[in-house]
Image (spheres, rainbow, N blue to C red):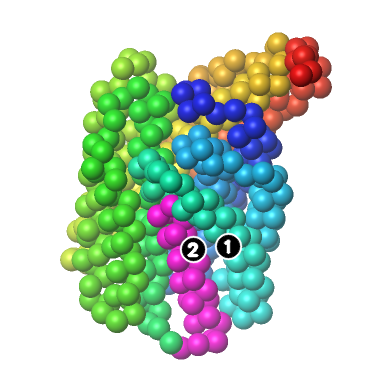
C-alpha cells in the first residue's frame, strides 16, 4: 500500500498526530448525530440556527479534523513533505480549532457578537498557521503530481473559505453591512463543500485509488486540469457574489459537472481493479462516488428550478454521504497501516498485522450501519414520522463505531510498545 511511496519513519508523523485528529473527528460526528437525534427536522431548516450548528458540526468538526489528520499523513506519502515538529504543529492547530468551533456553535445559538469575535480569533489561530505552512511547503516543490497540485488548490480554497467566513461573521455580528449575505453564503458554501472538502478528496483519489485498489490511472490531462478548474471557478463565484450574483448558478453548474465526471470516472476505475475481492473500503468509495454523482445531479437541477424541500434535503444527505463514505474508507486503510508501520519500523517482533488491528468483518459491520443511516436519511424528507431522529441515532452509532476502532488501534499500539519484544538495531 503506502510502501510504494518509500515512506520512512523519519518522514512519517508520530501515530498520535493522525489518530488524535481522527478520534476528534469521530467525537464531533457523535455530537452531530446526537444533535440530529434531539432536534429532528428542525436541524435541517435553512432559516434556523439549528441548521447552521449541524452544518458546522460536520464541516468544522468532523471533516476538518479527519482531513487535517489525513494531510499530516498524506503529505509525506503523496508529496514527500515532512514537518520537523509535527506534534507541536498539530497540537497548536487542534486545540484552538476545538475551542473555536465550540464557541462558534454557541454563537450561532445566541447571536452573541463577543462570542463570534472570540470564536473567529481561535479558529484563525488554529487554522491559518497550519494550512499556510502546508500550502507553502507544497508551493516549494519543484515538481508536482496531480495529487500534490490538487492539495495545494484545496488548501488555498480553505484559506479563502476562512476569509469569507470571517466576512459573514462580521455581518452576522453587525460589524459591517458591506456585502450581500445571501450571495456570500453561496460562495462560502461553494468554497467549503466543493473547494475544500470535494477538491481534497478528488486530489487524494488521483493516487490512492490506483495505489490501494490496483486500478488503471486517471487520465493525466484530466487529473492535471480538474483541480485548477474547480478552484478557479470557485474564485469566480466569489467575485460573482460581490458584483454579479446572477452568475453564481453558472459557476456551480461548472463545478457540479466536473465533480460528476470525477465520480463516474472513479466508479469506472473501481470496476476495473485487479484485486477481485471487494472489502468494506471499496464499497465505502462506491457509495461515496454514487452519492456525489446524485448530489451533483440535484445541484444541476436546483440551479435552474426551485427544488422542493424533500429534494433539497436529499441533496444535503447525499453530499454528506459522499464525504463521510470517503472518510470512513480512508480511515479503515490508514489506521491499521499506521499501527503496523510504526511498530514494525521500531523493531517490534509482535507488531500486529493490519487485519489484526481492525478486522475486515468489523469494517463490514460499519458499512451496514452506514448504509442503514443513509437509507433512513433519504427516506426521512418524504415521511411525516420521526425518521430524522432515527437517522441521528444511526449516525451516532456509526461514529461511535469508528471511534471505537481508532481507540482500539491506539490501545493495541500502546500495548505492544509496553510489553512487546523489540529488535535492538546495532549502533553505528
Residue 128 marker: 1
Q: Residue furthest right?
A: 418
Residue 202 spot, x, y in % from top left: 36, 44
Give the residue pinned by disc 2: 159
Observer-nearest of 23 and 147: 147
Whether residue 91 is visible: yes
Q: Looking at the image, which residue is at 46% across and 24% down?
A: 4
Q: Looking at the image, which residue is at 62% across and 81% down?
A: 113
Contact, mark 2 vs mark 1 (Cβ under 8 Å): yes
Stretch of the chain drawn in magenta: 152-177
Residue 413 spot, x, y in % from top left: 71, 25
Q: Is residue 79 above or below residue 192?
A: above
Earlier-in-chain disc, 2 versus 1? 1
Residue 344 spot, x, y in % from top left: 65, 18
The image quadrant that residue 121 belongs to is bottom right
Q: Residue furthest front?
A: 428
Q: Is residue 128 left or right of residue 265?
A: right
Whether residue 172 is visible: no
Q: CA distance from mark 2 to mark 1?
A: 7 Å
Magenta stretch encompasses residue 176: yes
Q: Is residue 196 above or below residue 45?
A: above
Residue 404 marker: none
The image quadrant that residue 175 belongs to is bottom right
Q: Residues within 10 Å of mark 1 (few under 14, many from 20)?
A: some
Q: Is residue 57 left or right of residue 406?
A: left
Amino acid at each position: 500500500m503506502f510502501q510504494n511511496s518509500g515512506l520512512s519513519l523519519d518522514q512519517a508523523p508520530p501515530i498520535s498526530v493522525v489518530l488524535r485528529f481522527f478520534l476528534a473527528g469521530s467525537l464531533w460526528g457523535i455530537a452531530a448525530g446526537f444533535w440530529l437525534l434531539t432536534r429532528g427536522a428542525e436541524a435541517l431548516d435553512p432559516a434556523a440556527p439549528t441548521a447552521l450548528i449541524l452544518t458546522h458540526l460536520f464541516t468544522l468538526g468532523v471533516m476538518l479534523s479527519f482531513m487535517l489528520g489525513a494531510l499530516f499523513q498524506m503529505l509525506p506519502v503523496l508529496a514527500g513533505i515532512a514537518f520537523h515538529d509535527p506534534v507541536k504543529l498539530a497540537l497548536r492547530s487542534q486545540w484552538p480549532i476545538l475551542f473555536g468551533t465550540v464557541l462558534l456553535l454557541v454563537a450561532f445559538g445566541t447571536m452573541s457578537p463577543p462570542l463570534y469575535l472570540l470564536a473567529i480569533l481561535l479558529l484563525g489561530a488554529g487554522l491559518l498557521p497550519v494550512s499556510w505552512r502546508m500550502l507553502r511547503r507544497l508551493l516549494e516543490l519543484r515538481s508536482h503530481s496531480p495529487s500534490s497540485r490538487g492539495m495545494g488548490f484545496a488548501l488555498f480554497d480553505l484559506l479563502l473559505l476562512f476569509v469569507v467566513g470571517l466576512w459573514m461573521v462580521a455581518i452576522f455580528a453587525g460589524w459591517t453591512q458591506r456585502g450581500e449575505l445571501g450571495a456570500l453564503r453561496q460562495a462560502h458554501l461553494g468554497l467549503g463543500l466543493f473547494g475544500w472538502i470535494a477538491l481534497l478528496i478528488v486530489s487524494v483519489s488521483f493516487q490512492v485509488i490506483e495505489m490501494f485498489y490496483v486500478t488503471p490511472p486517471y487520465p493525466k490531462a484530466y487529473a492535471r486540469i480538474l483541480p485548477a478548474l474547480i478552484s478557479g471557478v470557485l474564485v469566480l463565484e466569489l467575485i460573482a457574489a460581490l458584483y454579479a450574483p446572477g452568475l453564481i448558478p453558472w459557476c456551480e453548474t461548472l463545478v457540479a459537472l466536473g465533480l460528476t465526471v470525477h465520480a463516474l470516472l472513479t466508479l469506472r476505475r473501481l470496476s476495473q481493479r485487479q484485486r477481485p475481492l471487494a472489502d468494506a473500503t471499496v464499497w465505502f468509495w462506491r457509495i461515496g462516488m454514487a452519492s456525489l454523482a446524485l448530489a451533483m445531479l440535484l445541484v444541476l437541477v436546483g440551479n435552474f428550478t426551485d427544488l422542493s424541500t424533500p429534494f433539497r434535503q436529499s441533496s444535503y444527505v447525499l453530499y454528506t454521504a459522499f464525504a463521510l463514505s470517503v472518510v470512513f474508507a480512508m480511515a479503515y486503510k490508514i489506521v491499521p497501516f499506521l499501527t503496523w508501520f510504526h511498530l514494525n519500523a521500531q523493531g517490534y517482533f509482535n507488531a500486529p498485522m493490519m487485519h489484526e488491528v481492525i478486522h475486515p468483518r468489523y469494517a463490514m459491520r460499519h458499512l451496514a450501519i452506514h448504509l442503514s443511516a443513509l437509507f433512513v436519511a433519504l427516506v426521512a424528507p418524504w415521511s411525516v414520522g420521526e425518521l430524522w431522529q432515527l437517522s441521528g441515532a444511526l449516525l451516532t452509532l456509526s461514529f461511535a463505531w469508528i471511534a471505537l476502532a481508532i481507540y482500539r488501534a491506539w490501545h493495541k499500539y500502546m500495548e505492544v510498545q509496553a510489553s512487546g519484544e523489540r529488535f535492538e538495531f546495532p549502533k553505528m
